[in-house]
Amino acid sequence: MGEFTDKAKAAGNKVAGNVKESIGDATDNHDLEAEGKAQKTKGTAQDVSGTVKGKLGDDM
């Protein structure tokens, strides 16, 4: 995957994770809240991956 794809997936995971976390918190569903936090973390990792790919591509 390229930089743009990683960053797009990252944004989607961050939004979906935030929604899950918020719903889990509002409904006192700790499993859903934890799943949302994990998905946001995955999105952050994808964002970093995309950034690194972009930097490596710029230097070549």
Image (spheres, helix red, strand yellow):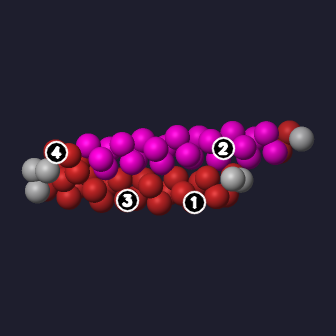
Q: Is residue 44 above or below residue 7?
A: above
Q: Where is residue 54 drawn, in percent x and y? A: 74, 46
Position of 47 with respect to 21 (left or right) is: right
CA neighbours of label 4 inside 10 A, class few (<14), some (14 to 19), many (20+): some
Give the overall secondary structure of the magenta segment.
Answer: helix
Residue 8 numbered tag: 1
Give SS at disc 3: helix
- The mark that comes first in sequence, 1 or 2, is 1
Q: Report if the CB atoms under discs 3 and 2 are less than 8 Å apart.
A: no
Work out whether mark 2 precedes mark 4 in sequence or the reverse, and give the earlier one. 4
Between label 1 and label 4, give the one nearer the viewer: 4
Q: CA distance from mark 1 to mark 4?
A: 27 Å
The residue beneath circle 3 is 16
Magenta residue check for 52? yes
Residue 29 at x, y percent in the picture: 14, 50
Please state the extent of the stretch shown in magenta in the rendering: 34-57
Q: Which residue does the numbered mark 4 point to in the structure image?
A: 30
Quarter of the image with the C terminus is: top right
